[in-house]
Amino acid sequence: MATLTAEPLAIQPGEKFTYRLSWGLFRKAATLEIVAAQDAKDPNGVTRITSHTATQGFIRALYRFDGWGEFLYETESGRLRSAKAWTDTGSKSTNASIALDYDKMEADYVDHVRPEKSVLLDIPPDEPADFITTLIQTRSWDIGVGEEEKVSVLFDDEFYELIIAVDRKEMLSTKWGKKPALVLIPRMEGEPKGMFKRGGEISVWVSNDELRLPLRFQVKVAVGTAMAILTDYQEDADASELQARAIPPLVSPEASN
């Protein structure tokens, strides 16, 4: 089993992935958009990845949810420089950020709603990435069925070590017809944490062709199964509209209660 260090990003500026999220009987519960662009402040060396998850339709009428993520990566090395994540349900907000200093091998995690949760973390030797980018990064791996890779992943205010194994091959029905796919299974090394502690199981389908598209994500937990299905892929998308809306809310400790 190999251990991966940071490598060039597998998501390129201009690429955009749009997913339909289903939950149980609700086939169109939410949408997930992920888009990459050259960072305006450092266009030659940094890629900005923006993600937005939003409930829609009937589900949104019952429960409004918007979740945002913004991640800065060094394009050539694949190193994560910083990350921001915030959510808004109308009645509750979260807002956190993390900045990574590789000279000191420290990461400064700041919870802007609950300052007492802020913490200084040690960066693990295997340079980490956020979870969504890690799943997309698998498209660049040259591994086959029965092989696995070890990665370091950022979840909120912790770094986790994951083993991602290629479980099997499948033919998957997609918007673009039948596509050959590799099914990857992430699992946590050591004591389970987060969704893994609650018995969560994750599967990732990556097309086994030249594009290596992340076609589907599936998360099984005790209360049901959530699935993200790729419905649109663009190689030269304009990220400006989504980035313009990616503004963390002004929140106070009272707003999170």
Image (cartoon, grey):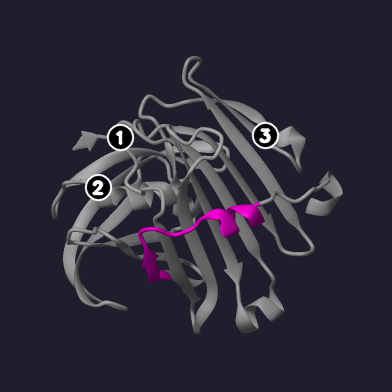
Is 20 colored magenta in this rendering? no
Q: In terms of sequence position, does the residue under pointer 3 or pointer 2 come before the other?
A: 3
Crowding at label 3, few (<14), some or many (≥20) Cα neighbours within 10 Å?
many
Q: Measured along the vertical axis of the image, is residue 30 above or below residue 135? A: below
Q: Residue at x 29, y 56 (%)?
A: 185
- Labels 3, 1: front one: 1
* CA separation in Å, label 1 and label 2: 10 Å
Q: Which residues are magenta?
A: 228-246
Q: Measured along the vertical axis of the image, is residue 92 above or below residue 85? A: below
* Total numbered badges shown on the rendered structure: 3
| Kind of residue at badge 2 | Ser
Is 241 colored magenta in this rendering? yes
Q: Which residue is mark 1?
A: 7
Residue 44 lies, in percent from the top left, at: 43, 33
Which disc is residue 140 wearing? 2
Nearer the observer, 94 or 35: 35
Decide if residue 53 is on the left or right side of residue 46: right
Q: Quadrant of residue 45?
A: top left
Residue 113 lies, in percent from the top left, at: 76, 43
